[in-house]
Amino acid sequence: MNKTFEFFHQLLVGPRALLFHATVIVIAFGIFHALGWREFTTVLSGTIPADNSSAEAGFKALAYMASYFASVLLAPILLIAAAIQFVLKRLFRVSKGVR
Amino acid sequence: MRRSNSEWDFMGRTFLALALAEMCERDAQLKSEYLPVIDTIIDETLALEKERGMHFFLMPYSKARPYEEQPERSLFVDGEIALMLATRRVVEEKASYKELFSARAELIQERLGRNSVMAVESYPNECWLFDHALALASLRIGEFLDHTDHAPLCRKWVSVAREKLADPKTGILVSSYTTRAKWLDGPEGSSIWGAAHFLKFVDEDLARDQYTRARKEIGRTFLGFGWSREWPSSWRNRSDIDSGAIVPIVNVSAGASGMALIGAASFDDADFLRALKTSLNFAAFPVRNHGALRYSASNAVGDAAMLYAETLGAIYAKVSAVKVAQLP
């Protein structure tokens, strides 16, 4: 049970997992930005870009905004958390005399 | 933009013309470049109105039923055209625009005088505070230009507004009402910030009072970010197209926050203005290209309104200086 918990812990919230999540978020944002989905954020002002349905524009706008805010708000937190976890684990192992 | 809202096409013209006029008033060297642009905007707007009728600039429901007052006219259209003409003339007089403005001002005055609560329709039996503020501002600028006197009319309107249109809980004037002053929408951010600015030309005390109340009831700041709610916490209403997207829980209104820029700039609220701009730069997705700046989350009318917020003040200073000079 402890091993199972440890496994899922490392998979989801361990330092490498947090680093992975942050990287995925930033890459997703980069892709949406490169695709030009920033322009669809005009739906916030009630304007649908020409040649687009409201559903399509809304989806692209939401995807862009979610990835943008995740990149600037969530990703840094994940990176900091990963760093803290990594340092604490190293300290814990050193204090236990484990290399 | 007309696909979303025909009004925005019209208001985009107005805000752009006003902004360019402000820039010319601040820097006379810009006149040669920008006055022709203002004139093109005005002339094209007038031509479209003549060719397609006022409904061209209104939302489809303007034709849903007859206007209470006949022949039908929209204060939204008349007021903004009058304001564009008046503001352009402040920068530099133009004889043809003097006649056009005088005719439009007479229409506005006549409509204001038609009923006891001075409520003029923008849509069938639908009157808007913002449109009245703008129209009255154009009349006050007309006083500066043509030495007319609209003070009694403005005083009466202010008195009626205080009595009939003020929300008892917040003191903020409601945004829309019928020709009998029955409220349709309550106090709204997408109306009051801009209305307060234009009311400065009409009655500075009322204008500042409205700005102060709006700042308290719907203006918000947190960790350096600023935004506007669409409604005070004491009022619940359906959102309309002018509200823009409203972020739940924090009730951030894109439309109201954009108009709050005009209010904060107009009333020299530097702290709130800075906070609003911080939010703008963080959450409106700025795009910088060859020295130009626009915001992806905005649209043409939003951009024009923001430009107006950045440039306003010179026209008011010029007009109000004369008003002050005329005081005994």
Image (cartoon, coloured by chain):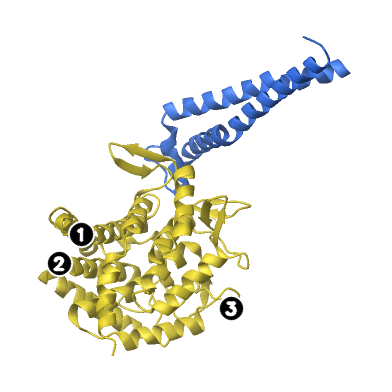
Chain colours: A blue, B yellow
- The answer to whether residue B220 is left or right of residue B297 is right
> Where does label 2 land, which residue?
B92
Q: Between marks 1 and 3, how big is the CA–CA gap?
A: 41 Å
Task: Tell which subunit mark 2 falls on.
Answer: B
Of helix, strand and loop, which one carries label 1?
Answer: helix
Is residue B177 among what the camera can see?
no
Residue B300: x %, y % from top left = 34, 49
Q: Between marks 2 and 3, how big is the CA–CA gap?
A: 43 Å
Task: Tell which subunit mark 3 falls on.
Answer: B
- The answer to whether residue B146 is left or right of residue B179 is left
Characterize the local packing of mark 1: few (<14), some (14-19) or many (20 or more) Cα atoms within 10 angstroms.
many
Residue kind at label 3, given as amino acid type: Pro
Q: Earlier in the sequence, mark 2 or mark 3?
A: 2
Which residue is rendered at x = 33% and y = 54% of the image?
A: B307
> Which residue appears farthest toward the left when viewing the image?
B95
Given residues A56 and B311, the one toward you in this image is B311
Asked if the residue under mark 2 is in contact with the one under mark 1, i.e. CB atoms within 8 Å, the reply is: yes
> Where does label 1 land, which residue?
B24
> Where does label 3 land, which residue?
B168
Asked if the residue under mark 3 is in contact with the one under mark 2, i.e. CB atoms within 8 Å, the reply is: no
Q: How many marks?
A: 3
Q: Between marks 1 and 2, how big is the CA–CA gap?
A: 9 Å
- The answer to whether residue B104 is left or right of residue B226 is left
Residue kind at label 2, given as amino acid type: Glu
Given residues B210 and B15, the one toward you in this image is B210
Say if labels 2 and 3 share a chain.
Answer: yes
Given residues B40 and B52, the one toward you in this image is B40
